[in-house]
Structure formats: C-alpha cells, structure tokens
Image: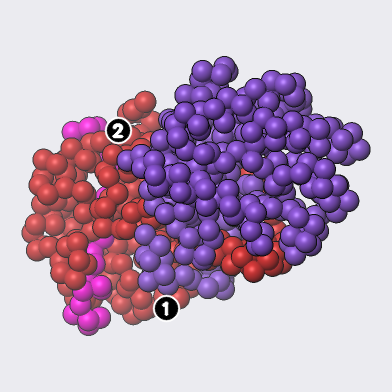
Chain colours: A red, B purple
Amino acid sequence: MFDKQMQVSLANQFRHQHHGTKLLILPNIWDALGARLMGKIGYPSVATASVATALVNGYLDGENIPFRRLLEIVRSISSSVPLPLTVDVERGFADNTIQLQENIRLLIEHGAIGINIEDSLPDHKRLYPIKEQCRKIEAIRETGIQVGVPLVINARTDVFLTESSASALTEGIERGMAYKDAGADCIYPVTINNYEDIDRFVREVGTAVNVLLMKSIPDLKKLRDIGVARVSLGPNLLSHVLVTMKEIAEGLMREDSSVFFSRELMSREFRDSLV
Amino acid sequence: MFDKQMQVSLANQFRHQHHGTKLLILPNIWDALGARLMGKIGYPSVATASVATALVNGYLDGENIPFRRLLEIVRSISSSVPLPLTVDVERGFADNTIQLQENIRLLIEHGAIGINIEDSLPDHKRLYPIKEQCRKIEAIRETGIQVGVPLVINARTDVFLTESSASALTEGIERGMAYKDAGADCIYPVTINNYEDIDRFVREVGTAVNVLLMKSIPDLKKLRDIGVARVSLGPNLLSHVLVTMKEIAEGLMREDSSVFFSRELMSREFRDSLV
C-alpha cells in the first residue's frame, strides 16, 4: 500500500502549497470522511489535529491514543483522498531518537507526507532545550531522506503557551530560525495572536509560518498580505462539530425538535458522494 | 473485557427504557466522543447508525465496512460510556445462520447490548421473505440466550422503502407482529411518516415501536402520547455535522472566517471533560 512515487509527488505538492499566491488553509479533520469533504470542497491538502484524533477515539490529547491507532487513522485518511496529508504527532510518541525515527517511518508508510512536531514537554508548561528539539527535527528530516519521501516538517513552538508575550516573541523567533536550520519547512508559533508579533515573526524567521486561526488575529486577507504561509484550525473544527451535536441533542432531550429541523440537512446524494 | 453481569444489567436497563413514561430518544452517534457527549447531556443510552459508522471510516453504507472495524468501534464506544449501547448491524454481515450467530456473539462480547437488524436485501428494493427474516431474529435471540445477555432486538422493516404507503402499512404490521413473535423487542418501520399510519402501527403491532425522526412526522410530544416508544435520528446527526463542517470550510476557502467565528466555540474544559 506504500506508493513511494505517489508520496514523493504529494510531499512536493504540499511543500509547494506553502509558497503559492494563495494562503494555505488547513481545516484540521480527524477521519476519512472529513478528509473527503475537504477534498470535495476543493482544499488542496488535509491535516489532522492531535486533539481531534485523540478525543473522537476516546482519549485525551497528550499522546494517550495508542500510536498503532493513530497509524490506522492515517492509513484510513490517506487511502481515502488523493491529497497530501500532514499529521499532528505531538512530540512524536517517542522517548528516544530510534523510536522517533521508527515512528516517522511508519507514519510515512501509512500515507503521511507531512507532520507537526511540538517543542513543549507533556505538561505544555516548559520547552525542551532548543538544541534537543533541533536534534529531533534533524532526526525526522533524516528519516524522510532515508525512506525517500521529502517529508514536510511543521515545527511547532509552544513558546507563546509557556511565556509572556514579550519574551515569547524573541525566543520564538530564535527557535524558529534554529528549527529552520535543522530542517523544518514551516514554523508554527501556536497562539501567536497580534498583527505586530505575526508580522515580525514572519519577517525575521525567513521561512513559511503557520498561524492558528483565533479571533484575535488579523483577518485572512491581511495574514496573506504580510506573508503568512499557512493557517490551521487546530481542534476548533471539532469544537464546532461538538457544539452542533450538543445543541441538537439538548433540544431533543427536551422533546424539542426545532433545532434539529431548523438546520439544513445534507442530501443523501451529497453525503454518499463523499465516499 | 467482557463483563457479562454489567451487560446483563445494561440490556435490562435498555429494554426498560422502551416502556417508561419518557420517550426513548436515540441521537445516533458513530464514535466514542459522540457517545460521551450524549452521556454528558443526560441520554440514558447510545446507538450507532450504520451509515455513520461506515462513512466516517471511508465506506459506503451497505456492509462495506469490514466487520472487524465495526467491532473495534463497538469496543471503543462501549468502553467509553457506562451506558447501554445498541448497534446498527444492517443485515448482520452474514450469509448464513452460523455466521450471523457468530457475529452477534462478537458484538455482545465487544460491548453491544442491543442491535438493529433490517429486512431488505442489499439493494433496499426488495424484502426477505417474512419467514426467513423471522428465522434470523430467532437465531439472534437464541445467541443472546446462549451468551447470557438478554440482547434488545430492534427489528427494522424496510417495507415503507420498498412499497407504496397503502400496502406498506398492512404488510408492515404483519411483519411487525411476526418479528415480535420471533423475539424482537421493538419494531422499526423506517420512514413511516404520518400520524394515522404511526398510530395504527403502534396499536396493532402491540409492542414497542421505533420511529425515524423526519419533518413529516408528528412532533415528539404527540408521538409519545400515541404510544411510540423510541425515536432515532438514523444518519441525520452526522448530516448536520457535515453541514456544519461544510459551511465553515467553504467560508475559509473564500478567505472568509465569519462563519467560523459566528458560532460559539466549545470551551476546552467542556471538550476535555468528555474524555
């Protein structure tokens, strides 16, 4: 099932999508159907969110889902859409470089052509030393080369989660530049959230930058204008889905079907056309 | 992982829920997270929809999903909520009685305490002869007894899908009575959709009746008043979810985040409290 030539092509397409005239938007999904829906709407690539792949399978985020189960999800999605698939693998589900490289190899063999790798400890309160994180990124890059698929590495820095905004920007830029030199294709300062910070981050890091879609960031057109390459939704598409389910289910619980019927129902034809 | 005493208790609870003063409403879900959400909202039991479990895994409805994968879903859901779980198994994924009984045993061992079994051929255009369907129901009932779990059988008749409304009602009632005698706990005339038909069906079949929630049926309070025991959503909760995802993703595709931001976001605390 591992078609190396196809994956080389998808990896190259995905890397290219970071440098086009259009903003690369990734509405993070968690299963084959979500991926099909995004393909049908016209998205050129799909991404998972670790929160979402964990929760829908009954696990909390934080590498609690068995890695084998994550691989099954990756296979299910990659075999359902002919699009580049990038997978959020948190810290790589590994305690050492050998395990990390094995996991990256398995992810590629199950159909991933890109990954997100983050630099905070499991508590999200402290960061790994910059050199240690760079060695992880180098090891991931090396695995892609060994397998023969030019994996697209999105290096997430959690510096805005762990530090005050002022010091976070400086350290985030330092980390971004180091991760880029270690082989990352894109830097993801998660929760960076104001125009000035984003603008400076993009200019100083000097490679593709991924921004999380939040209310406090500039609008999408402005992000594109200041050179942001990629915008992702993280767990928030799943949050919207859960709100929809909750509103309908709470209505029905009160024997009130108005919420259920007030919303447009997808036609069976459209729904089935997704598979 | 198979706790027989627990499942006996859950099966008895679920059977009892068909005969209480409250209408039993089943907002059909497809994964552990959906089940947790329904439990949190206060639903006393959870059900899958075959369309949903198939589609989210990349398969069309119609027993295309590997039965092993369906069992994994059943395990994932049943181990995530301490609630009765009834599983839509279409025609049982079996060509003969031995396979059918083996599959029912596996479903129970993976945590199901109820099932939906339908009486139309895979094309949904013709029905199995009534005696043949009764033998299937008897075989399922017998398996429950052998395993020691009083499985709740929801016998779906697809007569309203295959015949005109006039003849469907007569044949549906005949089938419902026969399925009840064969051991079904509840009869599900899928897409029955007007007050008179539902009222007559409930009175003549003389056991619990399941109605699919559709715009053309009476409101929930009236359904309860005329003695309907159970209302399910079939694939329509998933349809609503897909519409939500589609609207948000189409907006973002146009670099328009207003749809995304106009909706309430679920708090991380609530979301994580589900797992």
Q: Is residue A103 left or right of residue B182?
A: left
Q: Report the residue at 72% width, 21% height from top.
A: B131
SS at badge 2: helix
Residue B222 drawn above or below residue B127: below
* Chain at numbered mark 2: A
Q: In which quarter of the image is residue B51?
A: top right
Pinpoint residue B99: horizontal percent, then vertical percent.
51, 20
Q: In this view, does B237 lie to the left or right of A60?
A: right
Most extreme residue toward the right is B166
* Chain at numbered mark 1: A
Q: Is residue A118 left or right of residue B238?
A: left
Q: Report the residue at 22% width, 67% height from top.
A: A124
Closer-to-camera residue (A152/B60)? B60
Q: Quadrant of residue B275?
A: bottom left
Residue position marked by numbered label 2 in the rendering: A109
Q: Do the residues labelled 1 and 2 touch (CB within 8 Å)?
A: no
Q: Magenta residues?
A: A145-167
Residue type at the position of mark 1? Ser
Pinpoint residue A33: horizontal percent, then vertical percent.
52, 44
Instruction: State the quadrant of the C terminus of chain A.
Output: top right
Instruction: State the quadrant of the N terminus of chain A.
Output: top left
Q: Report the residue at 26% width, 43% height from top.
A: A67
Mark 1 or mark 2, which has the lower sequence index?
A: 2
Residue position marked by numbered label 1 in the rendering: A216
SS at badge 1: loop
Q: In this view, does A197 lie to the left or right of A94?
A: right
Closer-to-camera residue (B98/B227)? B227
Q: Say whether residue B121 is magenta.
A: no
